[in-house]
Amino acid sequence: MPPSHLAWKFRRLHYLLQRLRGSLRQRGWKGTLSRIRQELRRPPPNDPELTLEALNDPRPPARVPCANQPEVSVIIPVHGKLPWTLACLRSITKIGAAVPFEVIVVDDACADDTPQVLAGVAGLRLIRNERNLGFVGSCNAAAREARGRLLLFLNNDTQVTPGWLDNLCQAHRTEPDCGIVGARLIYPDGRLQEAGCLVYSNGQAWSFGRFGQRQDPRFLYRRTVDYVSGAALLISAELFRRVGGFDPRYAPAYCEDMDLAFAVRAAGKKVVYEPSCLIVHSEGTSSGTNPFEGVKQFQRINLDKFIAKWADALRTQPSPRIPADEAVHRGGRHILVMDALTPDPRRDAGSVQMLGIMRLLHEQGWRITFMADNRQATTEEILRLGELGVETLCDPWSPSLPRWLEREGPGLDAVLVSRYYVAAPHLPLLRRYATRARILLEVADLHFLREQRAAQQRGDDALKRQSQETKRRELATIRACDATLVVSTAERDLLAREVPGAKVVLVPNMHEVRGRRRPFQQRSGLIFVGGFGHPPNEDAARWLTGEIFPLVRARRADIELHLVGQVPDDAKPRLQGPGVVVHGRVEDLSILLDCCRLALAPLRFGAGVKGKVNVAMSHGLPVVATTMAAEGMWIEHEVNALLADDAEAFAAAILRLYDDEALWTRLSDAGLENVRRHFSFEVARSALTSVLT
């Protein structure tokens, strides 16, 4: 055997042994054997759930999107492989995006028909290199010609899916200190390819989640990572220029994306993995898979350059001996959040509040893990939490709470549980395993107070006795926790009397001030928001449609009442009547809030703060409410709302406000100011920080 062949065999064996050693450290024997089986197994066919463009289709798109003033320049370097390029362009054309963008293809001295075929594609900006510059040179050349504020570097062996570009841009816009955003990459067979990457202190990179299931919640939440693959990488043009673009020392390719990420991090910006952007990537199409020949050989050559350049930064990276699951979550404070159900802002105000709290925790750098008490969560709900950087524990993906706490409990800094009946059965387990965590109880409303008032309203002695037992259990749970978060000043003061030794902190409901989008004259109708899953809402809807609204219709038959919220089918006939429109649950409540003239809150019992009132006021929509609905919300009659507690007075207030534009405008302005002053994220952030410090 020639010496060159022996040298090749030795290098390959050495390379494989290095990979084996690294895998054993990260996965153990069981995980390593599973990984070897995955790599040796013949790849399955394309996932039927993915609608992919056929590689044997020779047709280019007639036109690709090309905005006059693009927000994003999509840069695709190509060196041959025309079928993949055409499939990529067809997917971009078919899917499109809401954000305006342009597509730049860099012909890196292609030897096939690429330049001739692409020259006929309308809207496509085609740049031709006189000589082969490789990925690094081609991307830098295209970046100099790009018109977009943002640059998306995209491999030609990718295909995009719905939401690809819009979701990347949203993450870049909303994530604090964001420098780079990368996608969730999957293989054409549907297996996960990359959910962000980490870099060890020896410079070795690790694609997190490789060959996992793409719907596993462990890979469906936004988080800060060491770097993301250049196969789909979004960065602002200004930052790209400021850090010097892709470093030419890595030409023609490999390690340039890792280097760019380290440069961005050195500039004080974050590298973010965004799972809601799903991109199919046929890995290895452009450069092959043999690490000892062609462009692929630069993977090892350039790694040495990277290690030399970033030696100081690598000292702060995790040791190769630390398993990937642990290394990817290194640093930062960890909090477990629990609630009865996975939050859905369309369902109740409690969900809106919990999402607001988790948003603040994410902004403050907490690692957040969420579990619903019923362990159920849809993919939509998981991704919604994922936008807030929240990892979801749910069936069938996650271990039981005891098993999870055995592993993670000692590292928890805090536990936040919503509702006393969720917290009570778990407290002994939490105290046993989360020994150094502060345990906080979040009270959407005091259940015993709501039951007391319902019993009084109905004259129900059995419910009154039940409320007394609920009070005993709820107050005992409050005593057992390190602190209790309430949303109402009235409930804060009540607990100060009932449980004088407990730490009770006011964390008000949080609402963005949306503002008044339509004037008085362009609005009509009344709106009540409240699903029947909450007893006070059911009682209010029946009182409104049965007694109050008929009095309004008797005077003004042109006024309509819009009921929004989940209503059982058997209850709808009892609510429907002249002028009553039962919408049920709606996807976008703001559409109705911007069209209606008044919001109503005819609640006769309940507790806590009424989210429906806050939401209406945040949209500049004046409110007619009962005294009960306004409790603990800094609301005064005639100052920032109209208050009435019987059907005749409530109907009279509606009719008065409905036609008085001056009063309507004054209450609208005052309502907006009430939300700014008392229900902003800034106020809640300060309170939450104090209780977690």
Image (spheres, rainbow, N blue to C red):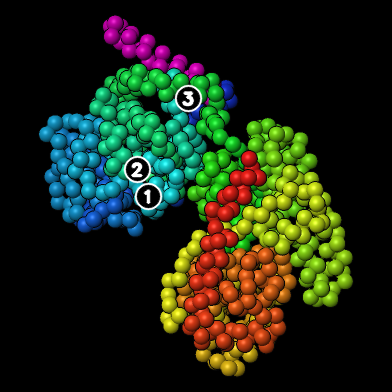
Residue at the spot x=49%, y=82% of the render? 662
Asked if residue 573 can be seen in this view, the reply is: no
Q: Secondary structure at mark 3?
A: loop
- Between 267 and 116, the residue placed more toward the observer is 267
Looking at the rendering, the stretch of residues picked out in magenta corresponds to: 1-27
How busy is the neighbourhood of tag 1: few (under 14 within 10 Å), some, or many (20 plus)?
many
Q: Nearer the viewer, mark 3 or mark 2?
A: 3
> Where does the N terminus fall, quadrant-wise?
top left
Classify residue 77 by image quadrant: top left
Asked if residue 31 can be seen in this view, the reply is: yes
Q: Secondary structure at mark 1?
A: helix
Q: Is residue 198 above or below residue 525?
A: above
Which kind of residue does numbered mark 1 sit on?
Cys
Q: In the displayed structure, does residue 181 sit left or right of residue 467?
A: left
Q: Which badge, 3 or 1, is on the more N-terminal residue?
A: 1
Q: Position of residue 465 (x, y in %)?
A: 87, 65
Q: Position of residue 434 (x, y in %)?
A: 71, 36
Q: Which badge, 1 or 2, is on the more N-terminal residue?
A: 1
Magenta stretch, main secondary structure, is helix
How busy is the neighbourhood of tag 2: few (under 14 within 10 Å), some, or many (20 plus)?
many
Q: Which residue is mark 1?
A: 169
Q: Which badge, 3 or 2, is on the more N-terminal residue?
A: 2
Q: Are marks 1 and 2 in contact (CB under 8 Å)?
A: yes
Q: Which residue is mark 3?
A: 317
Give the alpha-carbon distance from disc 3 to disc 2, as whole Å.
23 Å
Residue at the spot x=38%, y=45% of the render? 279
How busy is the neighbourhood of tag 3: few (under 14 within 10 Å), some, or many (20 plus)?
some
Give the alpha-carbon distance from disc 1 to disc 2, as whole Å.
8 Å
Q: Position of residue 675 (x, y in %)?
A: 55, 64
Which kind of residue does numbered mark 3 sit on?
Gln
